[in-house]
Image (cartoon, rainbow, N blue to C red):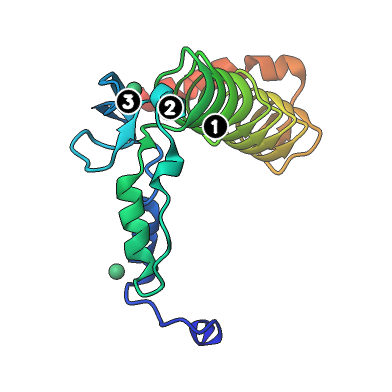
Amino acid sequence: MFYEKIKVPPPTFCPECRMVRRMNFRNERTLYKSKCIMCGKNIFSAYPEKSPLLVYCHDCWWSDKWSPLNYGTDYDFSKSFFQQFKNLMARVPRPGLSYTNTVGSEYLNYAVNVKSSYLVFGSHDLENVSYAKTAAHSKDSIDITTTLWSESCYETVDCAKCFAVLFSRYAENSQDDYFLFDCRNCSNCFSCTNLRNKNYHIFNQPYTKEEYQLAPDWIQNCFTKKLAR
Ligand SMILES: [Zn+2]
Ligand SMILES: [Zn+2]
């Protein structure tokens, strides 16, 4: 129906195969050891060295040693778009990785304004962050995905404005918490869901500050008992 409406032929591949082909188009997180074909420098690249694509290092690609305008070509209406697009892609040099303004962070791709970080992808404005994907404006964190304006976090997904939040998803404006799911403005909460403006809660139940501070022992005992069983 939809395809009839927009007057294009129905697809010949199933939806999943089409998704695989779309995702193949952008390799975001696999890094290969390769060489710049202009200066010969060893580089990390999104393309394996044996790839027929023409890959320059970051410095060569951004330099005036070549001009992308030399690769311009007229469009031929008698040939298919995709064939011409493929030919163009094969002829024009590309950067091995895509990044801007990074310091002390070699293992990355699609990254901007990144300092002293390791294995960060599709991210920007990070400092001292390792293993990040779509993270931004964050620092001193490890294993974060789609985490913004956060600090000292570990294993957070879809979190924002968090400080020292661990193993959490959909947490916002929160600090010193473990295992949150969809919580806002919470602090010192452990394993809580859907809480707003709360502190010292364990499994969504309120505790005094003193009780809460004993919780690590209580949790430790649970784990030890389990292991001993
Ligand atoms: Zn298929
Ligand atoms: Zn080079």
- Give the number of the mark in front: 3 or 2: 3
199 versus 12 height, above or below: above
Q: Quadrant of residue 201?
A: top right
Q: Nearer the viewer, residue 19 or 158?
A: 19
At numbered mark 3, what does the secondary structure look like: helix, strand or loop?
A: strand
State if disc 1 and disc 2 touch (CB < 8 Å): yes
Report crowding for label 1: few under 14, some 14 to 19, many 20 or more residues within 10 A (C-alpha).
many
57 versus 10 height, above or below: above
Residue with the mark numbered 2: 108
Q: Is residue 215 left or right of residue 59?
A: right
Three-letter code, disc 3: Phe
Q: Quadrant of residue 54?
A: top left
Q: Which mark is residue 44?
A: 3
Q: Is residue 168 left or right of residue 99?
A: right
Lower position in the chain sequence, tag 1 or tag 3: 3
Q: Quadrant of residue 126?
A: top right
Q: CA distance from mark 2 to mark 1?
A: 9 Å
Q: Which mark is residue 123?
A: 1
State if disc 2 and disc 3 touch (CB < 8 Å): no
Q: Is residue 185 left or right of residue 85?
A: right
Lower position in the chain sequence, tag 3 or tag 2: 3
Q: Nearer the viewer, residue 186 or 65?
A: 65
Quarter of image, ligand 2: top left
